[in-house]
Amino acid sequence: GNSVTQMEGPVTLSEEAFLTINCTYTATGYPSLFWYVQYPGEGLQLLLKATKADDKGSNKGFEATYRKETTSFHLEKGSVQVSDSAVYFCALLTGANSKLTFGKGITLSVRP
Amino acid sequence: EAGVTQSPTHLIKTRGQQVTLRCSPISGHTSVYWYQQALGLGLQFLLWYDEGEERNRGNFPPRFSGRQFPNYSSELNVNALELEDSALYLCASSLGAGTSGYTFGSGTRLTVV
């Protein structure tokens, strides 16, 4: 079946540090890949997505590249801000049953 | 454009009671999904409705059920509440198969005491 594995957290960084959050997946077929963000007390917001191999999704300074050869979709940001503190979820969607499968999520805390 | 709206935002129930949660999708979206986010368990898929039909169901007992109305809004019902049902229940909607991703509501925080 489909699964998403995210690196263990939590992650604490200083403002302006470089961020990488690892995500790998197992899926049948050719999934679409997503990063969602959940700010404290809120629901999930779509951060970025990629629908085929070598696609790069980007939004708000975050980016992730769909790597089919390594089955990965790592999230990166060059300079994090305090406002980026949130929980980040990697997810995949295959056409077979149209159900988003999420990783466990990772909490990011950014210190001023 | 209004986003996905859920009600109520919070509620407290006693073990053994029944609860109904409600969700209104984005206008034009025909698919509604329900997820449970319990502490330490991540996001667990509950149910998917599309065009009024249940399309897929997660690994939850039958006391979790729901329906979708002709206007595409949805209800999630949980009978015989247990303490471990305490969680944030998230509803999402999508256009068609959702290949562009889902739009989530802010959730309903259920506490069972």
Image: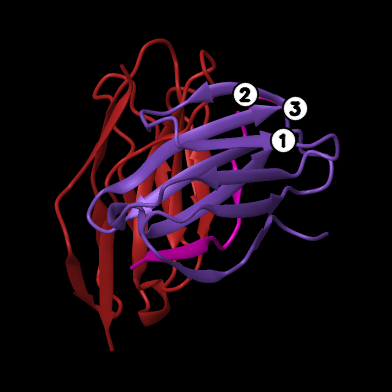
Chain colours: A red, B purple
Numbered label attached to residue B52: 3
Disc 2 secondary structure class: strand
Q: Position of residue A23 (x, y in %)?
A: 27, 40
Q: Are marks 2 and 1 in contact (CB under 8 Å)?
A: yes
Q: Residues within 10 Å of mark 3 (few under 14, many from 20)?
A: some
Q: What is the distance, in whole Å, between disc 2 and disc 1 at their CAs? A: 8 Å
Q: Which residue is mark 1?
A: B68
Q: Position of residue B77 (x, y in %)?
A: 56, 45
What is the magenta segment's predominant secondary structure? loop
Label total for image: 3
Q: What is the distance, in whole Å, between disc 2 and disc 3 at their CAs? A: 7 Å
Q: What is the distance, in whole Å, between disc 3 and disc 1 at their CAs? A: 5 Å
Query: Label 2 marks which chain's residue?
Result: B
Which residue: 66% across, 53% down? B22
Disc 1 secondary structure class: strand
Direction from residue A107 to residue B54 in the image, left or right: right
Q: Which residues are magenta?
A: B96-113
Considering only order in the chain, which callout, 1 or 3, is on the residue closer to the N terminus? 3
Q: Which residue is mark 2?
A: B54
**Image quarter (top left, top right, bottom left or bottom right) of the N terminus of chain B:** bottom right
Which residue: 52% across, 28% down? A51
Same chain? Circles 2 and 1: yes
Q: Is residue B84 above or below residue A56?
A: below
Q: Residue furthest front?
A: B16
Q: In the image, what residue type sits under mark 3?
A: Gly
